Image (cartoon, rainbow, N blue to C red):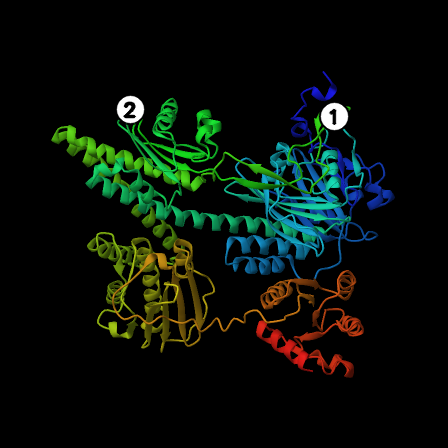
Amino acid sequence: MSDFEQQPDLTVCDREPIHLLGRVQSFGFLIAVSADWLVSRHSANLAEHLGSLAKDSVGKPLDQLFSEQAVHDIRNRIAYLQGEDSVERLLRVKLRDDLPEYDIALHFMRSLIIIEGEPSGPAGHEDIGITVRSMLMRQSSSSSMQNFFLSGVRQIRAITGYDRVMLYRFDQDEAGEVVAEAVAPRRESFMGLHYPATDIPRQARALYRRNFLRLIADIDDRGAPVLPELDLQGQPLDLSMSVLRSVSPVHVEYLRNMGVRASLSISIMAEGKLWGLIACHHYAPLRPTLEQRTAAELFGRMFSMMLESRERAETSEYEQRSRAITDRLMAVLAQDADLLSNPEWIADTISSAIPNDGVGVYLDGRIALSGMTPDESQFRTLIRDLGRGAASTIVASDHLSKLHPPAAEYSDRAAGMIAIPVSRSPRDYVVLFRAEKIKTVRWAGDPQKALEEDAEGIRLSPRKSFEAWRQLVQGVSEPFTAPERRVAEAVRTSLLEVILLLSEGRQTDQVRARERQELLIAELNHRVRNILSLVRSLISRTQGAADTYEDFVTTLEGRVQAIARAHDQLTIKQWGAVEIEPLVRAEAAAYVGGKEDRIRISGPEVSLDPVAFNTFALVLHELITNAAKYGALGDHGTVELRWGVDVEGDLIVMWRESGGPPVQAPMRKGFGTTIIERSIEYDLGGRARADYKLTGFEAEFMIPSRYVTVGTGTLSALKSGDAGTVLSQVDDFPKTVLLVEDSMLIALDIEDTLRRLGAETVMSAGSVRLAREAIANLIPDFALLDINLGAETSIPIADDLLERGVPFVFASGYGEQSQLGDRFGTVPVIAKPYGPTEVAAALATLRAR
């Protein structure tokens, strides 16, 4: 047997102790101090950063290395640490008067306090919190999930300066896919490429879940060892939470094979799991400052929470639809049990929640098939195989032949399935099939790592090529998602209940009555628990906001009565869609009895489904009670309440108070204000806007069309007059545009504007140096120059463009036109703020001149 016929050690990468490398990157230093503030260990390069005082530091008190003030600040900041997985930072610290400013990171590692320092970068223009807040405001405005992804990577690239920033999402097998990318011009795109799970070993994934940010400033940096190498127990220093931790040789080889010289990784967590990474690559050494990395990490954490919220909202909406399906199944099958043997009807009923290409039903030994399925004999064999599994367990697979080898014969028709057991004995099933989906997966190089032999023996080595490598995948279907599996479980429960109902005919009246009673009690228990949970939440929130016991009782009573009035109307309508006008009149009568005419209502006949009706009832209650306590209804004013349906079918509700006392925004938002401003958006996926105008409080709400039923009365659609006219693409707009703008967030908005007008490539630069570098790489067709760039102006760039014959216009926010001089007298100047209309007009003026 040759050497390469031996079995390779496939776990060598997973066993590499990457948290015990014993080195830190040399751009910074590390000091480990004991509880009595004596230096226990330090990086070998400590003297290079702290000078001769740092020689022979082990055993010295920390205040012999740092000033008294620096030690004091470090001691205070350590109080903020929340255990070993917490890292605190101090920016621009004067460790001693003879040293430059350093950024400090602090964390615990068992009994040691780990202090890491690195030189501070130049002072930024904005506070970290302000920067991240602006980034999050932009992020929250993303209209779709893909725009949300793209906005995230663009903003990380804007604040860190990496050549490439990718959002990398893991699938259920831990392989990854690039789902968004922001990359420098002339760099190849990695968008859509897949990476095998083996690219990130298990222990690296474990560290990503603990330490959310990982920096590699230069892969050629040999690092500085931590001294002494071992402690008195013979253990190396655990660097799991270190910001300077050195780089695994295997990972260095991986990055070098990609041509990458520096990288930054930000963990994206959702539902407590590693959802993916924001991976940043640079093709030269690069070290963003600790301040920049802190902003990036904070943004990454908020990005994770916003992503989780969006995914939960999507899942919630999906599962609401699925509950309607299960309700329909129970209602219809209880009236016509023969439909259970009708696979076409089952497919039509379930397909909107669990898309499928065919359905097979096995019930009491009888088989019914519809669509793309195995034949009857093959299906019976499959059911026999399924019967060997655990009872009442959903079985789902997108590779059926792997689970059930005989399925290879019909994988072109039924490559995947989700099997729903609907009884215990005999084993009856409803099986949804999905057809084969032949697809080409684009890997970043051959996903099978090459075998290499070294001193450790035969091992897996990082790939040498990262060019797109295509793999044809056959015999598999579209996978069944976690929400789809939950829907299948709900369908299973519903069908079991229906079968239970059908079996009652073979039992005595007494048994049948008892079983029905148990079902009714279970349903009643479910609804009562929901109501009690809501009331408990109202009690807790109202108690926290009330100043006195009387306020608490009055406010809570009003909110509970509002829910009761809503439930009364839902009960009358048998929990179907309910008109909103009676609800408005009922609330008005409860709080302005005898003066209902002070609330002027208008709008077409509109009904809401139970979920939206309950939410709207609470919002309306808070609006009326607030108006009665503090606003127009408490004085001699009036309220105008109008509603209508826009062209998308969404319900628009407008509330406007007038004639009351002067209004000002509350200093502290109570629970009632939270209900008004957040519940429609949170519970229904709609929108809410509150405006505390001096002349009277105003609010506008949007309830999505899926909750809205429009009556038969005449309806005039509301037109949105606030959005303005959106300028479409301009004919013959320059394809390559240079944008010089020193504000990152403004630049991102203008990039979107230019692309909407027709630009294909937008090169953004925040300084004269970066603009000149961009021009050297690619001559633009047109340029948009912000005159004032902070400490400099864009006039030198204008001179360069003038010499090259490139047309350009200026942008001004402060009336800096006086700085332009006579030679730029004919160049159009756009006043900030501006949008697509102003850019197009300036370009037209420029061409006319």
User: How many numbered dots are placed on residues in this image?
Assistant: 2
Q: Position of residue 332 (x, y in %)?
A: 23, 43
Q: Regarding mark 2 in the picture, which secondary structure is present there?
A: loop
Q: Residue pushed farthest top?
A: 1
The picture quadrant where one finds residue 671 is: bottom left
The quadrant in which residue 471 appears is top right
The residue closer to the viewer here, 4 or 680, is 4
Q: Is residue 601 left or right of residue 808?
A: left
Residue furthest to the left in view is 509
The answer to whether residue 482 is seen in the rendering is: yes
Q: Residue type at mark 1?
A: Leu
Q: Kindly state the secondary structure of the residue where label 1 is placed.
A: loop
Q: In the rendering, which numbered label is found on residue 232?
A: 1
Q: Is residue 754 above or below residue 529?
A: below
Placement of the C terminus among the 4 image quadrants: bottom right
- In depth, the one of 679 and 218 nearer the eye is 218
**Residue nearest the viewer, comparing 187 with 301:** 187
Of mark 1 and mark 2, the one earlier in the sequence is: 1
The answer, for residue 233, to whether it is visible in the render is: no
Labelled disc at residue 426: 2
**Viewer-nearest of discs 1 and 2:** 2
Q: Quarter of the image holding residue 415?
A: top left
Alpha-carbon span between mark 1 and mark 2: 66 Å
Q: Dot 1: few (<14), some (14–19), or many (≥20) neighbours within 10 Å?
A: few
- How many C-alpha atoms fall within 10 Å of the one at disc 2: few (<14), some, or many (≥20)? few
